[in-house]
Image: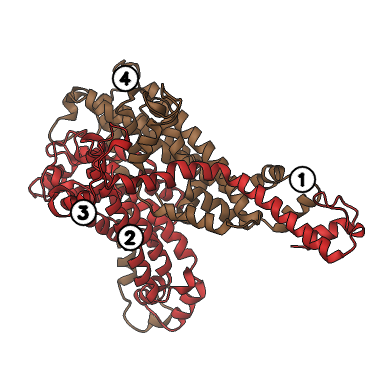
Chain colours: A red, B brown
């Protein structure tokens, strides 16, 4: 980091800082040391000034709230009274949620099913679609088709599919009737409600996953396929022995990011399950996901302490899942892709 | 691909597989396209149906006489302030986008082109928050906004009033910094050669002008990606506006508005109009996406976050 400044002063340009030029210094080394010190000091000041807007918002709206959350989760705070007056209740929020609160436990199970189902079934479908449309003509149109649901507000997606799932006027039951199958209560039966919402979630999210897979597919060197073809490999072998192993980092990436966001699903379940569609009401326990539980507990029932403890549990689940997944997939030779 | 009487298969009986695979591929492609398109088609067609058509069994595909007036009527309906929802969404999404661009690009510059103690630790701290679920913030941020000193009738200790909760700031401030945006800017700014920045410093440029005159123009693609991504994300965001507007209905954004309309029009009599409003709510993001597809898709390819 000494190069440019020294060259500058030799070329007769204005030297950096307020230090005298090197000729004026009795010892050149000392001058250079002082100069690099002042350069570092100036960069430190500038660095923190440039970071200050981000740090300010970060402290007030991210870091401080996390600390507050930890505290709130040990109180019986009701959101209305000043927090200073909330009573400390130790771990009772946590023990209540994990041992006695059936709805919270149901929400954990539902969210687990939702996360695993949407992420892994969604990835399988997305990989299929990616292979299907990767080298096909009219890819701009395809991109638009699969991406339109991604940019559509989830609340609108919920309305659209609420209509399609409608028991009497929906197209889906109409289709079933046409092929002689009995119509179903897609959103109002306890068995079908969550799978129906998951199907919609996959429909709405598949475009983003396809795009990431296509990016991954294009990164696989063509020579691998050429070499395999020379060796007489079948398309299936190519897929199994080249495409899938080479996509491993993509799969890792999609699993981690997918699980993190799937565990926080809110919009779609909220808009499809809690009225707002004409499809009737859904049994709450069948579709209750963690985020919906936390929202209701905190902002409807005003049990902020309990809800925040639930959020902490959610955080540990996401954190743990991510660590496990990273480890499992890294064991398969992922060190190079960190 | 291979012609009928050449190649290694010429001697044997031709396998029927390529033709079957080709046909199958075509059918599956068509089916995927249909599954993606039909729900949108249904939304538009049902927005143009009369009540009788919308409840007919078997369902109608396309109304006999499209009721285009549903669109005008829902815009003029005083019970549904669609204009207000759009105004709120535009204010909030633009302000958040602008703030995220400023905070991310300034932080990105500091994290790549300035050398100071604590730099990497701060970056890691930013990144760590990407793993925190939003629910860890919602309750405390709501409270922090409520206790904002000297705002909304609050005293210096943040007591007595509503704080920032009754103004657009409640929907804007919590999203002013984005770990994802900082991450993306850092990635992009790392590819700008250090020599360029050093040369500008030698010429006496201040850090602020290096940032604004060199770094910002050079990282325009990243800025576009962050802008479109943040804007659409904010436009579609439901959870936080839902929480804030419970006590401040005048701040309702478009997604909350659709939700409110669903209650206001719960009588199926107006199902067509409600669908018309939903169509109008979707149009802006679809248009934005169409015009900035490339930048938007890069955001997904780089991070995978929705």
The image shows residue B14 at horizontal and vertical percentages of: 33, 77
Q: Residues at marks 2 and 1, common chain?
A: no
Label 2, residues with CA under 10 Å away: few <14, some 14-19, many ≥20: many
- The residue marked by circle 4 belongs to what chain? B
Spatial CA span between label 3 and label 2: 22 Å
- Asked if disc 1 and disc 4 are in contact, CB closer than 8 Å, the reply is no
Q: Secondary structure at mark 1?
A: loop
- The residue marked by circle 1 belongs to what chain? B
The image shows residue A81 at horizontal and vertical percentages of: 28, 32
Disc 3 target residue: A108
Disc 1 target residue: B205
Disc 4 target residue: B69
- The residue marked by circle 2 belongs to what chain? A
Disc 2 target residue: A123
Spatial CA span between label 3 and label 4: 46 Å
- The residue marked by circle 3 belongs to what chain? A
Question: Please, is residue A262 above or below residue A328 in the view?
Answer: above
- Report whether residue A82 is seen: yes
Residue in view at x 19 percent, y 48 percent: A196
Q: Secondary structure at mark 4?
A: helix
Looking at marks 1 and 4 on the same chain, the residue that comes earlier in the sequence is marked by 4
Viewer-proximal residue among A30 and B276: A30
């Amino acid at each position: 980091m000494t190069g440019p400044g020294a060259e500058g002063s030799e070329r007769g340009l204005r030297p950096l800082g307020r230090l005298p030029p090197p000729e004026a210094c009795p010892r050149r080394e000392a001058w250079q040391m002082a100069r690099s010190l002042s350069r570092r000091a100036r960069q430190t000041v500038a660095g923190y000034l440039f970071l200050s807007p981000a740090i300010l918002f970060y402290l007030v709206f991210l870091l401080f709230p996390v600390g507050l959350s930890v505290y709130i989760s040990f109180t019986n705070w009701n959101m209305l009274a000043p927090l200073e007056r909330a009573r400390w209740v130790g771990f009772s929020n946590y023990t209540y949620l994990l041992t006695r609160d059936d709805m919270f436990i149901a929400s954990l199970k539902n969210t687990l099913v939702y996360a695993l189902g949407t992420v892994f079934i969604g990835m399988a479908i997305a990989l299929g679609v990616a292979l299907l449309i990767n080298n096909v003509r009219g890819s701009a149109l395809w991109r638009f088709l699969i991406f339109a649901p991604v940019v559509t507000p989830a609340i609108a997606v919920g309305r659209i599919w609420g209509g399609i799932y409608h028991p009497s006027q929906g197209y889906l039951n109409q289709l079933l009737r046409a092929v002689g199958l009995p119509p179903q209560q897609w959103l109002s039966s306890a068995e079908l409600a969550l799978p129906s919402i998951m199907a919609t979630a996959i429909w709405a999210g598949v475009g983003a996953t396809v795009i990431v897979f296509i990016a991954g597919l294009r990164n696989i060197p063509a020579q691998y396929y050429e070499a395999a073809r020379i060796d007489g490999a079948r398309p299936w072998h190519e897929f199994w022995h080249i495409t899938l192993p080479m996509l491993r980092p993509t799969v890792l990436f999609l699993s981690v990011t997918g699980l993190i966001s799937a565990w926080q699903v809110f919009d779609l379940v909220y808009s499809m399950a809690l009225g707002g569609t004409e499809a009737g009401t859904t049994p709450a326990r069948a579709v209750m996901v963690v985020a919906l539980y936390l929202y209701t507990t905190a902002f409807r029932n005003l049990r902020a302490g309990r809800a925040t403890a639930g959020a902490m549990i959610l955080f540990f689940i996401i954190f743990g899942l991510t660590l496990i997944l990273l480890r499992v997939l890294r064991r398969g030779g992922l060190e190079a892709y960190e | 691909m291979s012609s009928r009487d050449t190649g290694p298969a010429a001697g044997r009986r031709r396998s029927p597989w390529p033709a079957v695979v080709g046909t199958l591929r075509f059918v599956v492609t068509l089916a995927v396209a249909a599954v993606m398109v039909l729900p949108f088609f249904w939304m538009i067609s049902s927005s143009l149906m009369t009540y009788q058509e919308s409840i007919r069994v078997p369902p109608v595909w396309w109304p006999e006489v499209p009721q285009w007036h549903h669109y005008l009527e829902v815009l003029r309906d005083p019970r549904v302030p669609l204009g207000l929802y759009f105004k709120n969404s535009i204010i909030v999404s633009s302000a958040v986008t602008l703030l995220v661009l400023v905070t991310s690009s300034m932080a990105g510059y500091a994290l790549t082109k300035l050398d100071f103690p604590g730099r990497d630790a701060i970056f890691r701290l930013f990144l760590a928050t990407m793993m925190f679920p939003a629910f860890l913030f919602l309750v405390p941020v709501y409270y922090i906004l409520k206790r904002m000193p000297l705002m909304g009738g609050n005293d210096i200790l943040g007591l007595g009033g509503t704080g920032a909760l009754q103004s657009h700031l409640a929907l804007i401030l919590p999203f002013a910094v984005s770990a994802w945006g900082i991450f993306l800017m850092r990635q992009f700014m790392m590819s700008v050669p250090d020599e360029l920045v050093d040369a500008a410093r030698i010429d006496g440029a201040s850090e602020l002008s290096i940032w604004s005159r060199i770094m910002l123009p050079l990282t325009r693609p990243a800025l576009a990606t962050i802008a479109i991504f943040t804007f659409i994300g904010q436009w579609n965001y439901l959870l936080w506006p839902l929480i804030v507007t419970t006590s401040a209905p005048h701040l309702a954004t478009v997604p909350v508005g659709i939700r409110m309309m669903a209650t206001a029009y719960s009588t199926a009599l107006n199902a067509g109009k409600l669908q018309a409003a939903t169509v109008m709510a979707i149009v802006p993001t679809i248009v934005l996406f169409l015009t900035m597809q490339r930048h938007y898709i890069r955001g997904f390819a780089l991070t995978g976050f929705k």
